[in-house]
Image (tube, rainbow, N blue to C red):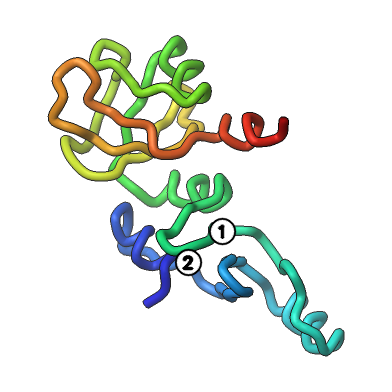
């Protein structure tokens, strides 16, 4: 079992296929990319779609999008919470329009079904959803 399986198992029974680990990073590849890798004869820095990295594992937005169609562990938030979540904020109870889990990790979606990131459901009655990672993080790191 690799870090990706451990993470995705919290959302779905489906497994990501064709995954390669290069140092601390995980990528989804296809057969053509593997042929190219073998032809080059050197270990590439990156290949295919970046899925995440590290121990503990930090997922990429591509992996969260992949999970979006395969999980029932999600919450849907209103427009105001959508913006605040993308800015790194936690979600207040009145902003949750739909929830399919009361504990553990959940994907956070907007009203259009787009994955915004993921968070952890807590026992806090006012702020039941703690932001763990959102797609706005990419923009915040680009300063």
* Picture residue at 34% right of the left edge, 65% below the top: 6
Residue 80 lies in what quarter of the image? top left
Earlier-in-chain disc, 1 versus 2 = 2
Compared with 98, 64 (above or below) is: below
* Picture residue at 35% right of the left edge, 37% below the top: 119
Image mark for residue 16: 2
Residue occupied by mark 1: 51
Q: Are marks 1 and 2 in contact (CB under 8 Å)?
A: yes
Circle 1 packing at 10 Å, graded few (<14), some (14-19), many (20+), is many
Query: Is residue 34 shown left or right of residue 124?
Result: right
Image mark for residue 138: none
Tag 1 secondary structure? strand
Where is residue 58? Give x, y as percent: 47, 53
* Picture residue at 42% right of the left edge, 22% below the top: 89
Query: Is residue 1 shown left or right of residue 140?
Result: left
Residue 57 lies in what quarter of the image? bottom left
Where is residue 92? Give x, y as percent: 28, 16
Residue furthest front in the image: 143
* Picture residue at 61% right of the left edge, 67% below the top: 28
Where is residue 60? Give x, y as percent: 55, 50
Query: Is residue 136 shown left or right of residue 103?
Result: right
Query: Is residue 126 shown left or right of residue 31?
Result: left
Where is residue 104? Give x, y as percent: 22, 44
The image quadrant where one finds the N terminus is bottom left
Q: How many labels does the image show?
A: 2
């Amino acid at each position: 079992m690799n870090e990706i399986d451990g993470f995705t198992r919290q959302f779905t029974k489906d497994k990501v296929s064709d995954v390669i680990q290069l140092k601390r990073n995980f990528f989804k590849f296809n057969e053509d990319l593997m042929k190219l890798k073998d032809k080059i004869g050197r270990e590439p820095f990156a290949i295919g779609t970046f899925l995440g990295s590290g121990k503990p594992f930090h997922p990429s937005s591509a992996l969260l999008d992949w999970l979006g169609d395969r999980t029932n562990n999600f919450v849907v938030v209103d427009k105001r919470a959508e913006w605040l979540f993308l800015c790194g904020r936690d979600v207040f109870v009145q902003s949750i329009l739909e929830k399919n889990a009361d504990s553990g990790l959940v994907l956070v979606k907007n009203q259009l079904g787009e994955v915004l990131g993921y968070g952890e459901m807590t026992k806090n009655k006012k702020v039941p959803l703690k932001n763990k990672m959102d797609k706005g993080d990419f923009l915040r790191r680009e300063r």
